[in-house]
Each structure stands twice: as C-alpha cells, then as structure tokens.
Image (cartoon, rainbow, N blue to C red):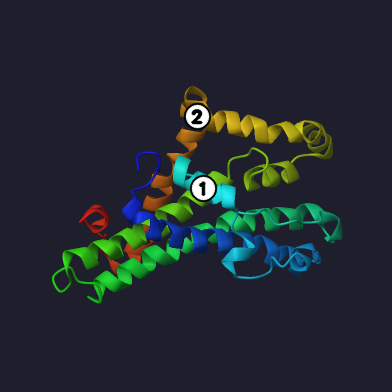
Amino acid sequence: MDFLYYPIEELPFLFLALMVGFTLHEYAHAYFADRFGDPTARHFGRVTLNPMAHLDVLGTLLILLAGFGWAKPVPVDRSRFKRPRLMSIIVSAAGPLSNLLIAFVAILLAYVLLMTGIVNPQQMSVGAFKAVGTFFHYMIMMNLLLFVFNLIPLPPLDGYRVVKDLLPLRMRIWLGQYEHWGAYIFLLLVFIPPLSAHTIRPVLGSIGDVFLWLDGIVSSLFGVRLDWFGFFNR
C-alpha cells in the first residue's frame, strides 16, 4: 500500500509503540494536573493507563499517512493550580519527557537483552531476531519523534505551552490574541512541502541527535556500543 507512510508488515510494531507512547504521554499530563489540584482530567476519565481513553482516531490515521500525529489532548484548568505558571510548565513538559523516558528505557532494555545473550542472533531464527529489532526500532524512534515533535513551539503543541508560560504577562496576552491561528499555521507548515522542508523537517531531523545522546549514556554503563544498524536492519 503505497499511500501508507510505514511498511504494512511493520504496522503491529508501530501500533504497539504508539499505544505506549501516546498513552503514557497523555497520562503524564493528566497525572500531574490532577496532583496539582485540577480534577478536570480525572472527571473526563483521563487519569488512566487505558489506551482507549487517550487515542485519537484522526491523529492515529495521520501517523499512518504522514508519519506523525497526535492523541486526544488532556483538558486542563490551570486556574485550579496554586502556582499556575510553574505548574502549567510542569504539566506541559511531562508529556514529552515521558516519551524521552520510554525511549531511554527501551535503549537500556535492548542493551541488557543483547549483552546478556537473552536475545542472541546465533540462537534465534532470522525472522524472530528481525521482529525483536523492529520492535525496539519503533519503540525508540516513535517515542523520540513524539518527544521532539511536541517540543515545537507552535500551538497546540506542548512546546508552545511551555514557552508561553515562560514569557512575561504582556507577551502572553499578545500571543493569546493569535493563538487560534496557530493550528492553521502548523498544518500549513506540515502539509506544504517547501515550508515543511525548512521548518518542521529540520526539527524532526534532531531525533537522531537525541538518540545518539541517549545511546551514549547507556553505552557508558556497559562499556560498549551496540551495532544499532545491524540490530534494526538485520
């Protein structure tokens, strides 16, 4: 199916990575908002690890067609927070940081499985080893995609919320006047190739740098670097 962004035979691994990434991302938003005194997310059933509470049909389909998408936004009433700006920053940042943590844990787990010989290409069929490699590829890369993508400072993404809350009041009020145009600007940047090539795509290109940074941290614990290319492409 040429209209799909990812190979059809790898879609089960993609969906698994998305369920984990989207669910923990939105749960992190809901959990911290709830802990900081806003019961809105709990009222709408979002303080849960049930993927069905967080997955968005259109956002998931867009992943298949364009390579990126979104989950259902968690409703947050920042007026319930004792310290609205600080707590809003934490709530907004919690989602992307949860994806970074998932990617880190997946890299660490891959090292443990390969270094201990639990996953051994010499003792597994080619198909089984390729399936393991594909699983880790999507679990790591899709969560790094969600981490980097959501840090883009355009509404309605988390990066915009963080940047906005760091600005002085006058700037926040000024941005708020044009915030409703942000989603349209974002869609134009995404779907018009010349604009995307000079805006969104270069940002997403930093995913490789984040991966190398995490891999460097984990490899220092084991004293050796994995052959990720061979693991992902065997």
- Taking depth in this image into account, of 195 and 227 the one nearest to the observer is 195
Q: In the structure shown, which secondary structural element does the residue marked by tag 1 occupy?
A: helix
Task: Name the spot of residue 211 as percent of width and height, x first.
Answer: 39, 52
Q: Name the quadrant of the N terminus.
A: top left
Residue occupying the point 40% across, 43% down: 4
Task: Name the spot of residue 116 as percent of width and height, x first.
Answer: 25, 76
Quarter of image, res 157:
top right
Residue occupying the point 27% across, 65% down: 223
Residue occupying the point 79% across, 63% down: 40
Q: Is residue 234 above or below residue 160?
A: below
The image's mark for residue 165 is none
The image's mark for residue 61 is 1
Marks 2 and 1 sit apart, C-alpha to C-alpha, by 19 Å
Q: Is residue 171 something that shows in the picture? A: yes
Residue occupying the point 74% across, 45% down: 165
**Residue type highlighted by circle 2:** Ser
Q: Is residue 142 above or below residue 221?
A: above
Q: Name the quadrant of the C terminus.
A: bottom left
Task: Name the spot of residue 199 as percent of width and height, x first.
Answer: 52, 30
Q: Is residue 229 left or right of residue 39?
A: left
Q: Is residue 185 above or below residue 20?
A: above
Q: Would you call the spot at circle 2 few (<14 residues within 10 Å), some (14-19), or many (20 or more)?
A: some
Q: Would you call the spot at circle 1 few (<14 residues within 10 Å), some (14-19), or many (20 or more)?
A: some
Q: Is residue 70 above or below residue 19?
A: above
Q: Which residue is mark 2?
A: 196
**Residue type highlighted by circle 1:** Leu
Q: Is residue 124 left or right of residue 18?
A: left
